[in-house]
Amino acid sequence: MLTLLLCLSTQALGADSDTEYRSAVLVSPIGPTVALVASAAGTPAFDLNVKAHHMLGDRVGLTLQTDFLRVRVEDVHVVHTGLKAGPRFALRGRGLSDWTLTPFASVGYTSVSAAHEHLVHYEVLGLGLDAGRTWVWKRFAMDLGLGVYSAFPVGFQTGAEALEAQAPISVSPIKPSVTWSIGYAF
């Protein structure tokens, strides 16, 4: 329902009138909002997810996305950094402001410590596909999308004997994703 309302409102506002823009930098408001609420509830958290699109032509471009998350629950600290990249295909050949498919590869690093002692760290490798829509109004850009991905931990290392045999496993080999980003087109 929300997607339908957004689609109808973009038509009424004259979206897609600025197709000459080839690049955009966007930030997801979802993670920072959740982190702000968690911090206000007593669990300090910080999340920043930045995405960049650059169209090489009317149909093909590149997407690069980075994520940083830090959460502290009492003496336990979790830090995650990640990078996701892939080609961006504009389905109607309208450049930046279009329906898109973005296959991607991702890499990430997660570290957990407690009371200043290293507990565990591991890398994450993944593949996925995002399908979405980007709108541009003047220089304001917005992305909405759905996707699927699969990510697996590799390089598991622990400094705690109790965790040695408990490498993280993927709960589901294929996971859904929802994206929403707002930003600046140029």
Image (cartoon, rainbow, N blue to C red):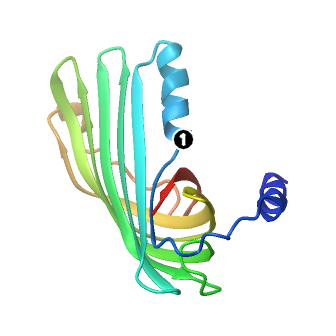
| Label 1 crowd bin: few (<14), some (14–19), many (20+), radius 10 Å | some
At which x and y percent is residue 53? Answer: 43, 67
Three-letter code, disc 1: Pro
In this rendered view, identify the residue nearer to me: 166 or 72. 72
x and y percentages locating residue 174 in the rendered image: 54, 65
Which residue does the image show at 39% across and 30% down from the upper left? 46
Depth check: give the residue in front, 54 or 179. 54
Q: Answer left or right for 122 relative to 72.
A: left
Is residue 2 positioned above or below 79 on the image?
Answer: below
Can residue 127 be seen at all in this image of the molecule?
A: yes
Quick check: can you spot residue 164? no
Where does label 1 land, which residue?
Answer: 29
Q: Nearer the viewer, residue 47 or 124?
A: 47
Left/right of residue 48 with respect to residue 6 in the rendered view: left
Q: Is residue 119 above or below residue 101?
A: above
Residue in the picture at 49% in, 34% down: 32
Label 1: which secondary element: loop
Lateral position of residue 44 relative to residue 17, left or right:
left
> Residue at image x 30%, y 36%?
79
| Residue at figure coordinates x 32%, y 58% from the top left | 83
Quadrant containing the N terminus in the rendered view: bottom right
